[in-house]
Image: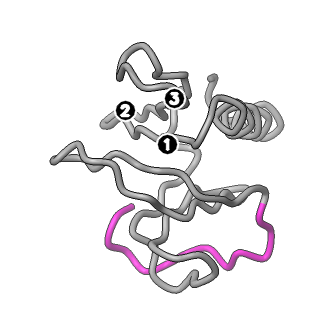
Amino acid sequence: MEGKPIEENFEVIIKEGWLSKRSRFLKGWRKRWIVLTPNYICTFKAQGNYNSPTEQILLSEFNSILPADEELNKAGTFKMITMDREFFFLAENQTDRDEWVSTLGQIFMHTGLKNL
């Protein structure tokens, strides 16, 4: 859901914080403020300004979430997989990565979304 107007009102924020996200084409890492709601994961260039996300992805589009340390040879990484794309994220450390993966896993289990 890239390039579309924001569809989330951010009344319920489950988790938010800084992660680096790997760019789709250049494969570089960009620091982004990540906001997780019951329906979306959104990325922003700055904390607190929820008007124009750099990306807004429906959680229901994801098939799985997995650690990606070995695949990328980089500690603290995880990937979220949709039918069409893989999204790679980098946390500051393994603990932060595990918290994000756990939180996302809980959302999937409680909402009946696809398996992780």
- Callout 2–callout 1 Cβ contact below 8 Å: yes
Residue at x-position 75% and y-position 56%: 15
Residue 40 location, x and y as percent?
Answer: 60, 57
**Label 1 – label 3 distance at C-alpha:** 7 Å
Residue 68 location, x and y as percent?
Answer: 46, 22
Q: Quadrant of residue 76?
A: top right
**Label 2 – label 1 distance at C-alpha:** 7 Å
| Amino acid type, residue under disc 2 in the picture | Met
10 left or right of 82 in image: right
* Residue range of the region highlighted in magenta in the rendering: 1-13
Which residue has dot 1 on it? Answer: 61
Depth check: give the residue in front, 37 or 73: 73
Which residue has dot 2 on it? Answer: 83
Residue at x-position 57% and y-position 44%: 60
23 left or right of 91 in image: left
- Callout 1–callout 3 Cβ contact below 8 Å: no
